[in-house]
Amino acid sequence: MFSIKTVIRHFLECQRQFAFCEHCHWCATKFIVGEEHEKRLVHLDPNLITDILSNSSYHQACPMCKNNSVSLTPLEKNEGYRISFGDKDGLEIQFFRLRRSLPIPKHHMYQ
C-alpha cells in the first residue's frame, strides 16, 4: 500500500501540502520531495492549479477510513496551520504566515 523510503532533505527544500480527509477529519502535512513536485507542476498554468486541485482525481485514499476523500491544499514555505476542535465550534483550521524563518536542521523524512 505505502512505500517508505528514508530521504535526508532540509525541511525548506520540500513542497508541503495540507492533507485533510473530508469524511473522518484525519489530517497531516504531506511533504513532496524535488522531482515528484516538478513532474506534477511543470506544465500547469498557474491560473488552473486551483481547479485541478479541486478535481476529484486529486483526492486520495485516507489511511484511517479508506475513503477516497483526502483533499490536498498547497502550503507556502512561510505558511503554517493550527487545528482545534471544540464542543461548541467543532473543527477549526486556521492558516497563517510564519513570522520568521527558523533554521531547521536536516532530518529523516519518509516519502
Image (cartoon, helix red, strand yellow):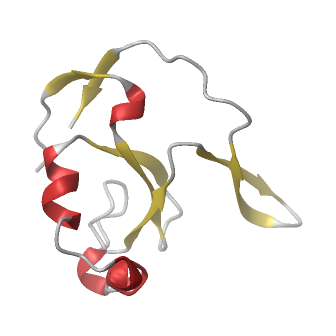
Residue at the (49%, 18%) spot, across then down: 104
Residue 41: image quadrant is: bottom left
Residue 91: image quadrant is: bottom right
Is residue 79 found left or right of 61 in the rendered image?
right
Residue at the (32%, 82%) spot, across then down: 52
Residue at the (71%, 51%) spot, across then down: 96
Taking depth in this image into account, of 69 and 15 the one nearest to the observer is: 15
Up/down of 103 relative to 59, above or below: above
Which image quadrant: the C terminus? top left
Q: Position of residue 3 (x, y in %)?
A: 10, 40
Taking depth in this image into account, of 59 and 52 the one nearest to the observer is: 52
Q: Position of residue 58 (x, y in %)?
A: 28, 75
Q: Position of residue 19 (x, y in %)?
A: 43, 58
Q: Position of residue 70 (x, y in %)?
A: 38, 68
Up/down of 90 relative to 69, above or below: above
Taking depth in this image into account, of 4 and 62 the one nearest to the observer is: 4
